[in-house]
Amino acid sequence: QIKNQNLIVLNGLSSISTALKNSLKTFMKSGGVVVLIPNKKGDLKDIAEASDQLNLQALTKPVVKYFLCYPKEMKLEGS
């Protein structure tokens, strides 16, 4: 259930229903965090309107990916 979560990631959505918008509003009012990653081929107008209604902020800079890899034999201090 949504109310039991701290973070919701909506990845690849092409549109957002009214019911989902309402659920997300309630979730965010109680302190939940929403990350919205739209589908490139989806209805961007619908996604933009939903993000405005939910008061979601858009990223204005490209996202940089960082990958951390540890050797299998590496032991962390305190392990």
Image (tube, rainbow, N blue to C red):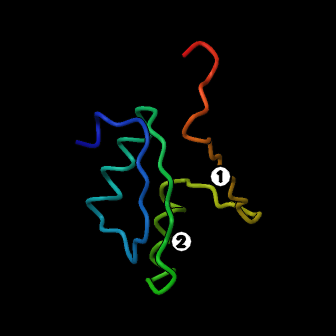
- Point out which mark residue 67 bears: 1
Q: Nearer the viewer, residue 48 or 5?
A: 5
- At x 39%, y 48%, the residue is 25
- At x 61%, y 42%, the residue is 71
The answer to whether residue 79 is above or below residue 5 is: above
Q: Residue furthest left?
A: 1
- Point out which mark residue 51 bears: none
Q: Secondary structure at mark 2?
A: helix
Image quadrant in which you'd find residue 3: top left
Q: Quadrant of the N terminus?
A: top left
The answer to whether residue 74 is above or below residue 62 is: above
Q: Nearer the viewer, mark 2 or mark 1?
A: 1
State if disc 1 and disc 2 touch (CB < 8 Å).
no
Total marks in image: 2
The answer to whether residue 39 is above or below residue 16 is: below
Q: Quadrant of the C terminus?
A: top right
Pointer 2 or 1: first along the chain: 2
- At x 64%, y 17%, the residue is 77
Which amino acid, mark 1?
A: Phe
